[in-house]
Image (cartoon, grey):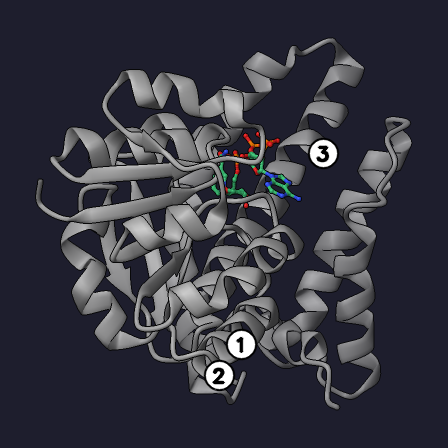
Amino acid sequence: PKGNLTVLGLGAMGSAVAARLRESGYATTVWNRTAAKTEPHVAAGSTAAATVPDAVAAGDVVLVVLLDHASVREHLEPAAAGLKGKVVVNLTTTTPNQARSTAAWAAEHGIAYLDGAVMAVPGMIGTPGSRLLYSGDENAYAIARPALETLGAAEFTGADPGVASLKDMALLSAMDLMFLGYLQAFAMMRTVGTSAADTAAEVEAWLAAMLPHGKGIAAIVDGGTYDTGGQSVDFDRFGIASLITASREQGVSAVLLEPHRKLLEELAAAGHGDSDWPRIIDRLTIHR
Ligand code: NDP
């Protein structure tokens, strides 16, 4: 074998990770709270451990793929002594601060900690579309990297252990708002009998044509002056008001669009009606 790896958690994602590592030539020891889920992995060549400390003892690198932050801490903390000197790669989805908290806990116990974010669904693990982000201990990344690269394109995003999950959640936020946009369009168009399938095709083509503008918006934000003379806050206020009116006239709630108008109104009230509309980002930053 190329090395000894431990996988804690054999849900949909943990199972895909364990299978891929095994197929890539690693000796894998697996543990799962519900022990029955280890059976197919044992049949395929993995070793099952009855307890977390036993599982941890068998691997040089320990991959954690549990449900959430609480389940990670519940099972890692009692195994701290056995984890000392090992590399822990936590692929469980957590918030940036949860990742930082686990990294601080790991540092206290002499554990090299890497926090991961999986930008893939289980079926994509090990395929070209799969991408995983890692942040935290760079030395841990160097050690685990050959194994991690079997899971998908690997990217180290920095020493702050929270950054991988922050980036994950920023990308998911963008996706979330985009797909809510699809639903708004579906709701508007079904008032005239257009199927969601037909509207989806239209939205896809429209968004594809618009996507390149994202870089232009980024340039305005990075420039920081909001005075390029492009689409202004005031111009956008009228535009969004029309969308809200049209939506309501069709009997469709504008609840998803109203926050956009509110942010523009706030900017106008603060004297920024002439600013480039991406100045909205200033309203998003909470000053503490
Ligand atoms: P599943 O629901 O399929 O599996 C959850 C796993 O967590 C199971 O192994 C379960 O054990 C275990 N678990 C839950 N609570 C506890 C606990 N208190 N103690 C011990 N084990 C526990 O989820 P996934 O495998 O899909 O997801 C795992 C992680 O991967 C999550 O953080 C998820 O956000 C992340 N992820 C998942 C993606 C996906 O598309 N599925 C995509 C990207 C990230 P048991 O079998 O005993 O219930």
Kindly identify which residue carries mark 2: 108
Relative to 159, residue 244 above or below: above
Residue 38 in the image: x percent, y percent?
Answer: 43, 25
Q: Residue at x 14, y 35 (%)?
A: 24
According to the image, label 3 marks what residue? 184
Report which residue position mark 1 lands on: 105
* Other residues around mark 3 within 10 Å, as few (<14) / some (14–19) / many (≥20): some
User: Which residue is at a point 48% across and 54% down the rendered structure image?
Assistant: 171
Q: Position of residue 131 (x, y in %)?
A: 30, 46
Against 16, residue 135 (above or below) is below
- Quarter placement of the N terminus: top left
Q: Position of residue 216 (x, y in %)?
A: 39, 66
Is residue 55 visible in the rendered image? The answer is: yes
Q: Residue extending furthest left?
A: 2
Q: Quadrant of residue 126?
A: top left
Contact (CB < 8 A) between labels 1 and 2?
yes
Q: Nearer the viewer, residue 191 or 93?
A: 93
Q: Quadrant of ligand 1?
A: top right
In depth, the one of 61 and 238 nearer the eye is 61
**Res. 127 visible in picture:** no
Q: What amino acid does circle 3 point to?
A: Gln
